[in-house]
Image: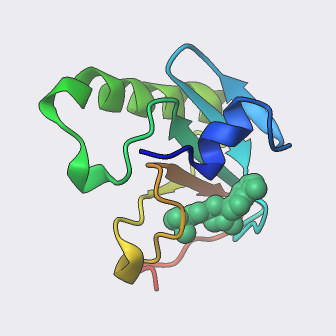
């Protein structure tokens, strides 16, 4: 897989507001926020989309979920946030490197658009 936008960000080739980083993942503020808090949680391993994750990625996917807890507690949004994963262009995916949107800071309606 060729280098993605998010790989370039974590390699510090492209600037971004990195709010969290550990061995396996990092979180940045979305450049076009859809809520007062809009983060992207991104595995360092460039899986192109969730539906292409493999059994070998099981621990990584679990790690991302636990990182959500860590990050949302740090930002004190742990009581009200939404996770979203856009999988495929027709679902709104524009960057083909798996990422979890973390949205918070406003009332979040259901169903999402
Ligand atoms: P998706 O449409 O689900 O693939 O999400 C990609 C997200 O990346 C969008 O919400 C964009 O606003 C965001 N984005 C694109 N380029 C950057 C960037 N350079 N820094 C931060 N966020 C970005």
On the image, which quarter does residue 10 sit in?
Answer: top right
Q: In this view, does 104 lie to the left or right of 84?
A: right
Residue 55, image x and y in percent?
13, 30
Residue 110, image x and y in percent?
43, 78
- Tell me the quadrant of the picture where the N terminus can be found: top left
Which residue appears at 61% of the width and 58% of the height? 103
Residue 92, image x and y in percent?
46, 77
Which residue appears at 19% of the width and 25% of the height? 56
Q: In this view, does 14 lie to the left or right of 57?
A: right
Query: From where the camera sits, is residue 73 visible?
Result: yes
Q: Nearer the viewer, residue 107 or 28?
A: 28
Q: Which of 88 and 5 is in front in this view?
A: 5
Query: From where the camera sits, is residue 81 visible?
Result: no
Which residue appears at 46% of the width and 70% of the height? 93
Which residue appears at 43% of the width and 31% of the height? 64
Q: In this view, does 72 lie to the left or right of 110?
A: right
- Which quadrant of the picture is home to ligand 1? bottom right
């Amino acid at each position: 897989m060729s280098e993605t936008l998010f790989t370039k960000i974590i390699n510090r080739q492209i600037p971004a507001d990195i709010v969290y980083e550990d061995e396996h993942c990092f979180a940045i503020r979305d450049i076009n926020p859809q809520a007062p808090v809009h983060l992207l949680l991104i595995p360092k391993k460039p899986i192109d989309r969730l539906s292409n994750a493999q059994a070998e990625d099981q621990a990584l996917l679990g790690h991302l979920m636990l990182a959500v807890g860590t990050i949302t507690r740090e930002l004190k949004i742990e009581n009200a946030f939404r996770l979203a994963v856009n999988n495929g262009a027709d679902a709104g995916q524009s960057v083909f490197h798996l990422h979890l949107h973390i949205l918070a800071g406003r009332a979040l309606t259901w169903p999402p658009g």
